[in-house]
Amino acid sequence: MENFFSNIYKMFHILSEIIVWSYLVLVGKKRSDKKIFIDQFYEISVNSFPIILITSFATGMVLALQLGIVMQNWFGDPMFVGMSVSFTFSKELSPILTSIIMAGRIGASITAEIGTMKVTEQLDAMASLGAHPLQYLAVPKFLSCIIIIPLLSVVSCIISILGGLFVSIKILKIPYSLYLKDAFQTMHISTIMHGYLKAIFFGGIVAWISLYKGFNCKEGAEGVGEATTSCVVTSIILILVSDYFLTSLLTALKIS
């Protein structure tokens, strides 16, 4: 039990340090290397786009097909498919799907990178040269995740709606004009912001857990492997659990 509370303390301690360093970098009180930020943005956005494209389009197709079949069996007509797909993805599936994918791809990469640097004592060498590891390693990764992951979530929503459109036209025989009309009926600003704010929070979780696991991994190659696996599992659990509380909070604030 003591070890559990010790880990919780370390997690929130490193989070507070990352937030402080991020603030100092953003307001210009601490120097930042723009090239590091650009490289990190590119790694998270461009290199992640193909997998977001494929998974979102496929999931949109599956959801539209399942909804169309259910509506056909219940009402004799595959109605409201566009509305259901756009509503579900804009508020829930796109933020969660994107964040889980990024936890497996980017989160694991960040943990492995920093964990390897710790094991090979590169972090100690960096600190001895006067370069704070959080400033040069954690801040670019943290800010990149909370900026890029929400944008990828928006892209995921658009692609998934197009996937549903493809199935609706080719299989369910729904006119594209009707599908798009139903889809846009649910795309209010509050609905979009509901999913976007969730994605920002989930992006922060991915960055936070991956950085914590990297900076606190055990020695040796086995320790790096354990930290990487633990990062992905912990991030996914926190994303799914926090989703309920975020939904309740945003609904109470009438962002829904």
Image: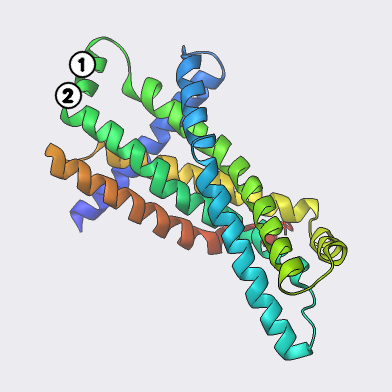
Q: Position of residue 193 (x, y in %)?
A: 70, 49
Left or right? Give the position of 132 relative to 242. left
Residue lying furthest left: 220
Which quadrant of the structure image shows residue 138? top left
Mark pair 1, 2: CA separation: 6 Å
Tell me the quarter of the image containing the C terminus.
bottom right
Rendered image coloring scheme: rainbow
Q: Amino acid at mark 2?
A: Glu
Seen at 28% across and 51% down, the residue is 229
Q: Position of residue 174 (x, y in %)?
A: 81, 71
Say which mark, if any, is on residue 125.
1
27 w.r.t. 209: above or below = above
172 w.r.t. 45: above or below = below
Q: Is residue 59 visible?
A: yes
Seen at 22% across and 32% down, the residue is 116
Q: Secondary structure at mark 1?
A: helix
200 or 165: nearer the eye?
165
Residue pointed to by mark 2: 121
